[in-house]
Image: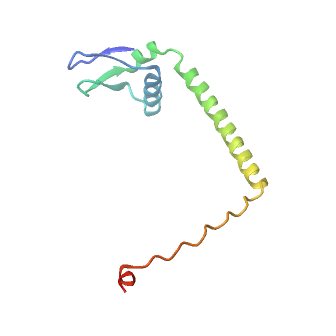
Amino acid sequence: MQLRCSYCQTMFALSHEEMLAALQYMSEEDLHYYDAHCPKCRRANRVERMKLQRAYPNWQDVLKDMAKDAAKAEKEAAAALKKEKAAAKSEPAPAAEEKPAAKKKVKSHKEAGK
């Protein structure tokens, strides 16, 4: 969605992700306007909820799909983590490494002068 800053007249765009986040935030907080910040002057520009909804008509369906995908990915990640832990427990402990040879004793300055 293309917007023009009402202060500096710079054109800037809102991505689909930003519009989706804005619509979700406005619906949760029961707001009528979203503050889109200009990248040049950093001032907040009011964008009406209806304007965002016209630009992203099926935002609620997309949000539900994203929530389902996130839950599915979370379950898969938990299952993978569980498998890794089980594999780590079933492997034998690595053999103890040999200790390095003892270092030679270095004489201090006082001992060297004697």
Whole-percent x and y of residue 94? 72, 58
Q: Residue extending furthest front?
A: 114
Whole-percent x and y of residue 54? 45, 13
Describe residue 79's horizontal placement relative to residue 108 as left or right.
right
Q: Nearer the viewer, residue 31 or 22?
A: 22
Q: Nearer the viewer, residue 105 or 113?
A: 113
Q: Residue extending furthest bottom?
A: 114
Q: Quadrant of the C terminus?
A: bottom left
Q: Is residue 111 above or below residue 44?
A: below
Residue at horizontal 75 percent and vertical 55 percent from the top? 89
Q: How many marks?
A: 0
Describe residue 112's horizontal placement relative to residue 88 as left or right.
left
Whole-percent x and y of residue 4? 28, 15
Describe residue 18's horizontal placement relative to residue 44 as left or right.
right
Q: Quadrant of the N terminus?
A: top left
Q: Is residue 50 above or below residue 82?
A: above
Q: Quadrant of residue 109?
A: bottom left
Whole-percent x and y of residue 69? 63, 29
Q: Is residue 97 above or below residue 51?
A: below
Describe residue 92's horizontal placement relative to residue 42 as left or right.
right
Q: Nearer the viewer, residue 11 or 48?
A: 11
